[in-house]
Amino acid sequence: MKVLIKSAWGSADPTQATFPFHHANAFAEAGHQVQVFLLGEAVPLMRPAVASAVVPVGWAPLAEALAKLIEHRVPIHV
């Protein structure tokens, strides 16, 4: 299955901001073709300093989820 995950959530809400990344990883690990499309407030999440500072409640930090996406070679469009 091909999946496109779109997000505009930014660092103001760390938990919502990381959901697309964790969900994309789950799809990739299940063998699906997945892409992430970021717009608006979500674009700055691609800066290493911002990604390192975003820590959601009950989930792994954004920097870890982003590293997994890169490992899975998931395209991220900004």
Image (cartoon, rainbow, N blue to C red):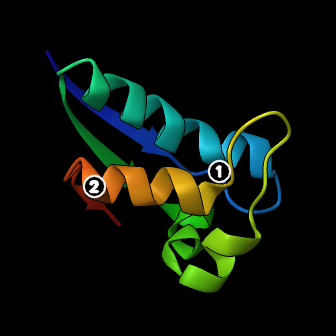
Please give the name of the residue rendered at 53% of the width and 81% of the height, measured from the top-left corner.
47
- Quadrant of image for the N terminus: top left
Element at badge 1?
Answer: loop
Front residue of this view, candidates 59 and 50: 59
Residue to which mark 1 is pinned: 9
Can residue 38 be seen by looking at this rendering?
no
Label 1, residues with CA under 10 Å away: few <14, some 14-19, many ≥20: many
Relative to 44, is 23 above or below? above
Element at badge 2?
Answer: helix
Mark sitting on residue 1: none
Label 2, residues with CA under 10 Å away: few <14, some 14-19, many ≥20: few
Please provide percent x and percent y for residue 54. 74, 63
Query: Left of 78 or right of it: where is 49?
Result: right
Relative to 42, is 15 above or below? above
Q: Quadrant of residue 30?
A: top left
Specify the amino acid type for callout 2: Glu
Please give the name of the residue rendered at 42% of the width and 41% of the height, measured from the top-left corner.
6
* Figure label count: 2
Residue to which mark 2 is pinned: 71
- Quadrant of image for the C terminus: bottom left
Relative to 22, is 26 above or below? above
Please provide percent x and percent y for residue 12. 82, 60
Please give the name of the residue rendered at 60% of the width and 36% of the height, measured from the top-left corner.
19
Please provide percent x and percent y for residue 42. 57, 61
Front residue of this view, candidates 67 and 15: 67
Specify the amino acid type for callout 1: Trp
Depth check, mark 1 against mark 2: the one in front is 2
Query: Left of 42 or right of it: where is 55?
Result: right
Front residue of this view, candidates 38 and 46: 46
Query: How far separated are the C-alphas under marks 1 and 2?
Result: 23 Å
